[in-house]
Amino acid sequence: MARPVKLRRLISPHKEITFTPAGNDTSGKEKVTLLSEEYEVIKLVDYEKMHHMQASKIMGISRPTLTRIYERARNKIAESLVELKDLCLVEGNSILGDNWFICQQCESVFNNPQNISTGNKCPLCFSENIDKL
Amino acid sequence: MKNNQVNNLTAIAVKEANLNTKLEDCFGKSGYFFIADPGNKKFEFVKNPGLELKKMSGRHAALFLARNKITTVISSNFGASVKKVFDKNKIRLVILSPKYKLLKDIEWVRKLI
């Protein structure tokens, strides 16, 4: 039996976004789904210009695993660009490193590093309708 | 920025130094920070000291906020180096939902100004 996939650690929660090629009718076309850990690798390596080793330590995975995820992510982005397909960012095999919460009223996300009592309220709208991510 | 304003200081990444400004999506690339002390009803705009740097601008800005005893930072996007500084200094991060576009969209800011 194959070993279960080790969850990749994310720095912060991601928004679920779909990128659509402007001016093209993408309805009926297959979508490309970019997993949250693939987005995270692209962000760390290509946007923040980290070495693979640095990025792999942050995500709690080995360097070869990170490189494989990176290659898969780039292939997906290329497919979306060349074939004019929607690129959807979806949840993958990942966990959040900290205590993160979401406000159900304003949909903002926040953490509580000091475990302060006001952490039970949204820091923006002060709603108590919050859930742990 | 005066260092004696130490209680519950919140920094919000914004584009310009006026009250009608838009919120900045990327923490390190924000033009200014709206620094507010809601308890004492004080606020000011502070220029992002890391903006003109070619590298590590976000980390530079994060260290600046940490030195000035900021307890909460509000923005839409943070990098790994920024997060590391905030974690070390136990600064709370708030990631805005896309429905917040302007500084005035935040209710407590409207009340403050």
Image (spheres, grey):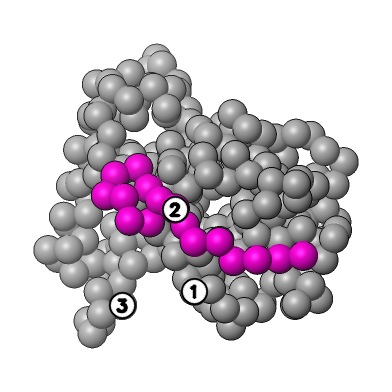
| Residue A131 included in the magenta stretch of the image | no
Q: Chain of mark 1?
A: B
Q: In the rendered structure, which amino acid carries the disc numbered 1?
A: Glu
Residue at image location 62% in from the left, 74% down from the top: B103
Is B61 left or right of B45, judged from the image as shown?
left
Dot 2 corresponds to which residue? B49
Comparing labels 1 and 2, the label whose residue is closer to the camera: 2
Residue A22, position as x, y percentages in the image: 25, 80
Q: CA distance from mark 2 to mark 3?
A: 45 Å
Please state the extent of the stretch shown in magenta in the rendering: B42-57
- SS at mark 1 in the image: loop
Comparing labels 2 and 3, the label whose residue is closer to the camera: 2
Q: Please say if A3 is above or below B87.
A: above
Q: Please say if B56 is above or below A90.
A: above
Q: CA distance from mark 1 to mark 2?
A: 14 Å
Q: In the rendered structure, which amino acid carries the disc numbered 2?
A: Pro
Q: Nearer the viewer, residue B46 or A70?
A: B46
Residue at image location 47% in from the left, 57% down from the top: B48
Dot 3 corresponds to which residue? A27
